[in-house]
Image (spheres, rainbow, N blue to C red):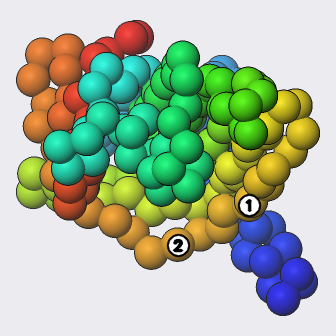
Amino acid sequence: MAGKNRNDADRIRKDLLSAVGNSLGSGTGGYSLSSSVTDPQRKKLFGLWRVEEHLVGESDYIEHFSRSTLNGRPLLNPQYLAEYEFRPAVCLKRVDIIGILDIEGREVPYSYRMRLALTWEIGSGVLKVQPELGYQYSSVDGVASTVRDFYSSPPVAVVFVLKDQSLVLEEGGDRKILRRIS
């Protein structure tokens, strides 16, 4: 199984490098993509976006995270930062959550980090994203508690609404409101 995952990861890495390489301008060494071949709607998404509000159903994401990931333990003084960076070939998703857990009367630091590379395309009012490669890491009191690699998985359709400097992403009961950072 480890060999298959390694082969899948190598294939994905080559595909991503090829996609990035194909978008390089000749002789410049920098990124370029002709505006004549870029969908105007797609081009509007390019850049860095920060999640300002994240709800799962009617609950704040941190409450949902505490119930589903921390076995119902509340995360004290939570700080949540999630960003999406849309580039021509990939979208980089970054999520960081930190806070304090009360474990048997002792307060200990908790941190969670996820990094994910997604390929993406725009359909009719739908953003089709496909996770390609990434990882998830969490620690309690400075000691790793979860380490997980992500490999390619099937595409997901996410309803999106883009208006001025705001982007709304909805997938089932999960709703995020993002603001453009750059």
Q: Nearer the viewer, residue 10 or 145?
A: 145
Query: Of the residues shown, which amino acid type is indicated by label 1?
Result: Asp
Label 2: how many Cα within 10 Å (few below 14, some 14–19, many 20+): few
Above or below — where is 166 with respect to 75? above
User: What's the residue type where badge 2 is placed?
Assistant: Ser
Picture quadrant where residue 100 is located = top right
Q: Quadrant of the C terminus?
A: top left
x, y percentage for residue 93? 52, 39
Residue closest to the eye, 107 or 175: 107
Q: Nearer the viewer, residue 173 or 118?
A: 173
Q: Residue furthest bottom?
A: 1
Residue in the picture at 68% in, 50% down? 136
Q: Is residue 124 left or right of residue 168?
A: left
Instruction: Specify the farthest residue to the front.
Output: 105
- Residue shown at 45% from the left, 62% from the top: 130
User: Label for residue 93?
Assistant: none
64 vs 25, left or right, is left
Residue 36 visible in the picture: no
- Residue position for label 2: 153
Q: Quadrant of residue 178?
A: top left
Q: Where's residue 164, x and y in %?
A: 12, 16
Report the residue at 55% width, 23% height from top. Answer: 76
Q: Position of residue 50 (x, y in %)?
A: 39, 21
Q: Residue at x 84, y 88 (%)?
A: 1
Give x and y (percent) for residue 173. Answer: 20, 55
Q: Which residue is mark 1?
A: 149
C-alpha span from label 2 to label 1: 12 Å
